Image (spheres, rainbow, N blue to C red):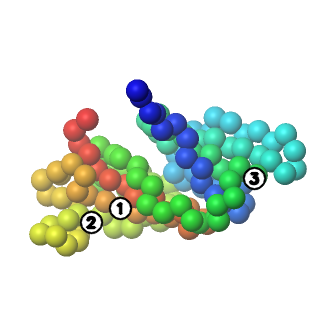
Amino acid sequence: MDLKLELVLIPVTDVDRAKAFYADKAGFAVHVDHQPSDDFRVVQLDPPGSACSITIGKGVTDAAPGSVKGTHLVVTDIEAARAELVGRGMEVGEIRHFASGTWAPGADPEHRNYNSFADFSDPDGNTWLLQERREN
């Protein structure tokens, strides 16, 4: 049995502000922006290269805006990914990796899978973590 994760709900306070952040700064593709009433709006966006989408909107979740923490975006080159996001005007934390059980600055010198990270937040405080995996 396959269980494919296809959609993650991200609670936000201002749909237009969040849509601009995810589309313009994070580079997510907008696939749906549907508002059948004043009480319901769904905006579906895909991170580049991902089979899983996010949905922001009005009336789509009762979770508190900013309550989603630590959603991972896996990248093959963390330095290039961070540079691209920073170039789009996003604030992204410095790259760090684990060394001897503690955080160390910069990417893992050996670029071991799942060992280099950088984080960012959306305007509501939902947090994301870039994580490097060089091998598929």
Residue under numbered circle 3: 58
Query: Tag 3 or tag 1, which sits nearer the N-term?
Result: 3
SS under mark 1: strand
Q: Amino acid at mark 1?
A: Ala
Relative image position of residue 97 (x, y in whole percent): 23, 63
* Residue at the image position 20 percent from the left and 65 percent from the top: 98
Q: Could you say which is closer to the camera, residue 3 or residue 58?
A: 3
* Residue at the image position 40 percent from the left and 53 percent from the top: 72
Q: Is residue 63 visible?
A: yes
* Res. 10 image quadrant: bottom right
Circle 1/circle 3 CB separation < 8 Å: no
55 w.r.t. 62: above or below: above
Residue at mark 2 to residue at mark 3: CA–CA distance: 35 Å
SS under mark 2: strand
Q: Which mark is residue 96?
A: 2
Query: Tag 1 or tag 2, which sits nearer the N-term?
Result: 2
Q: What crowding class fits label 3: few (fewer than 14 Cα within 10 Å), some (14-19), or many (20 or more)?
A: many
Mark 2 or 3: the one toward you: 3
Residue under numbered circle 1: 118
Relative image position of residue 74 (x, y in whole percent): 35, 47
Relative image position of residue 54 (x, y in whole percent): 57, 45
